[in-house]
Image: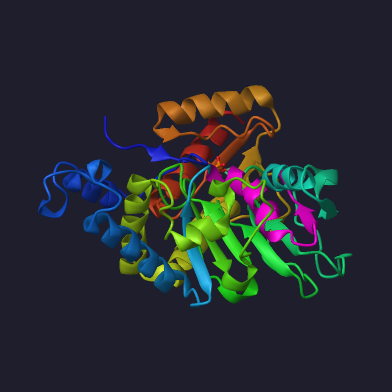
Amino acid sequence: MGRIYNFSAGPAVLPEEVLQQAAADMMDYHGCGMSVMEMSHRSKMFQDIIDEAEKDLRTLMNIPDNYKVLFLQGGASLQFAMIPLNLMKNKKADYIVTGQWAKKAYQEAKKYGDVVAVASSADKTFSYIPDCSDLPIREDADYVYICENNTIYGTKFHTLPNTKGKDLISDVSSCFLSEPVDVTKYGMIYGGVQKNVGPAGLVIAIIREDLIPETVDDTVPTMMQYKIHVDNGSMYNTPNCWAIYICGLVFKWLLKNGGLEAMQKRNIEKAKILYDFLDQSKLFKGTVEPASRSLMNVPFVTGNEELDAKFVKEAKAAGFENLKGHRSVGGMRASIYNAMPKAGVEALVAFMKKFEEENA
Ligand SMILES: *Cc1c(COP(=O)(O)O)cnc(C)c1O
């Protein structure tokens, strides 16, 4: 069997060229007689891999010199604790709760200080992004936290919140490298890479230097101190070498294909094909308010659970994988990350049209 169209929310589709390159490198990376998985992280060869990955990421995102780039483990979920443990200096932080991942981050931070949800979209099952132009941000809050693209609910901040001068911390796991970003608007941007960038188990954190404390409370585990990872070039312990290498290949693929501006253009085109279809369909319906729609994750329903299940089953048989919605939302969700070709979205829409006709 050949490749299918994989609409998984994560771990997710990767560019075929990257997979082919990894396959070609597998037995003998650059003439060293072994794969990247087998080499010492202290070797020059691996140092070159991580240095090049960081350099290419800095180019892609135009990351200023006063921001550190860290390659960490523990998933985006470990950052839910690392962020308050390192950055909540006054022990106060304000969170905007727009979905499950933001809620988890908020609940975790509450363990460590005075943490308030200054806005939420829970009242309408997280189907929109609240107006964040004039929130009651506290004078002495250390930071304002958002989840920029809500993977499960399919919403996205198209305008960043007015943080009233506080540092913005953003979880960009599911929109990482999907469009250009102005890094200077953030104190920290981070994301698990398994959504739009690489294999699971690696988180990239981009943090403004002056936010990283020299010392933290003695009880904070060594592995959870940003300063330790900065001082050790993300190699305090053995890093996720393989994932860093694959991300490096993806960065090169992005650079070769026009960078983040080109990705944004492609992603807008791809999402439009699907949203335009949903907006005129008599059977399928998008679940998100149009102004808050994500370009990456597109949830939709028929309004009938049996029909949803039938659709997912028939779609799978036709080569469209992982269209079942998140267990907390039901229905369907198509994740159409950078590596999903436009042809995949067109084929999905053609399949949905046919299903609609057959089930009218
Ligand atoms: C998937 C996801 C996470 C959790 O990532 P893990 O690597 O599994 O911890 C956090 N935030 C967002 C926005 C996600 O999509």
Looking at the picture, how far across and down is residue 356, in whole percent? Answer: 57, 35
Identity of the residue drawn at 74% across and 50% down: 98
Looking at the picture, how far across and down is residue 67, in whole percent? Answer: 53, 71
Is residue 157 shown in magenta? no
Q: Is residue 353 left or right of residue 262?
A: right
Looking at the picture, how far across and down is residue 10, in whole percent? Answer: 50, 41
Q: Residue furthest right?
A: 136
Looking at the picture, how far across and down is residue 1, in whole percent? Answer: 26, 29
Is there any visible trace of residue 293 in the rendered image?
Answer: no
Identity of the residue drawn at 66% across and 31% down: 330
Quadrant of residue 281 within the rendered picture? top right
Q: Is residue 339 left or right of residue 225?
A: left
Is residue 81 shown in magenta? yes
| Ligand 1, image quadrant it occupies | top right
Q: Is residue 233 left or right of residue 67?
A: left
Is residue 329 depicted above or below 222 in this figure?
above
Q: Which residues are magenta?
A: 75-99
Viewer-nearest residue: 177 or 266: 177
Is residue 197 depicted above or below 54 in this figure?
above
Viewer-nearest residue: 181 or 46: 46
Is there any visible trace of residue 119 in the rendered image?
Answer: yes
Q: Is residue 142 left or right of residue 12?
A: right
Viewer-nearest residue: 300 or 297: 297
Identity of the residue drawn at 82% across and 52% down: 115
Please state, as top left, top right, bottom left or bottom right, where the C terminus lies in the image: top right
The number of callouts visible is: 0
